[in-house]
Amino acid sequence: MLANKKPTILVVDDEKSVRELIRLWLESQGYDVFVAGDGRAAITIAATPETNIDILITDIIMPQMNGRDLANRICSIKPFIKVLFISAYTAEILSRYKLCPEGSDYIRKPFTKETMMERIAKVWATSPKWKELVANEA
């Protein structure tokens, strides 16, 4: 990982206004961004061989496929991906239903641009890859 390289980010949220706002924030900071409205569209983007994705930002509760299942599927295509979950639900609820593994990076909606940028920087600099995080689960 290059110290000055900004990660390429895939944003997945079933709410168009949320994913577009995040896309605008990220692009204004110089990030390359892909967006998808659901898990199937996200997997299609990730499966394109020339598409590099470093960080997956995904809502956890979405129709058809939850964020954890999406992270697992994308990790099978892009094994070095890191994940940042976003959700309106509390971390306790997500943990209780095993939707958010222990140690996952998570932001509760609503959040500010500053919070999002700080968390992306943390995820990129210090968070484990998704496959390492879920491998440590009991």
Image (tube, rainbow, N blue to C red):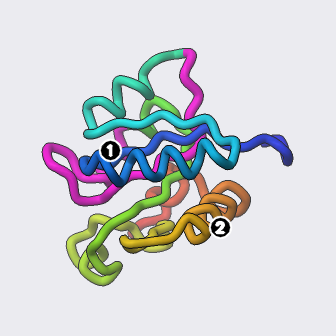
Drawn side of residue 92 relative to residue 84, left or right: left
How far across and how far down the image is residue 32, in percent? 61, 35
Look at the picture and state if 119 lies above or below 92: above
Comes first in the chain, label 2 or label 1: 1
Residue lying farthest right? Answer: 3
Q: Disc number at residue 60?
A: none
Q: Quadrant of residue 52?
A: top right
How far across and how far down the image is residue 76, in percent? 43, 34
Look at the picture and state if 108 lies above or below 123: below
Image quarter where the N terminus lies is top right
Q: Say which element carries label 2.
A: helix
- Asked whether residue 71 is drawn in magenta, I would say yes
Image quarter where the C terminus lies is bottom left
Residue for point 61% across, 38% down: 8
| Real-space CA distance between mark 2 and mark 1, rounded to the nearest whole angstrom | 23 Å
Drawn side of residue 83 relative to residue 41, left or right: right
Q: Which residue is mark 1?
A: 70
Amino acid type of disc 2?
A: Glu
Q: Bin the neighbour count of mark 1 within 10 Å (Cα to Cα): few under 14, some 14-19, many 20 and up.
A: many
Q: Which residue is mark 2?
A: 118
How far across and how far down the image is residue 95, in percent? 30, 76
- Asked whether residue 29 is drawn in magenta, I would say no
The magenta segment: 50-73
Residue lying farthest left? Answer: 64
Look at the picture and state if 127 lies above or below 79: below
Residue lying farthest bottom? Answer: 92
Q: Say which element carries label 1.
A: helix
Residue for point 39% across, 67% down: 101
Towards the viewer: 14 or 78: 14
* Contact check, label 2 and label 1, Cβ < 8 Å: no
Residue for point 32% across, 44% down: 70
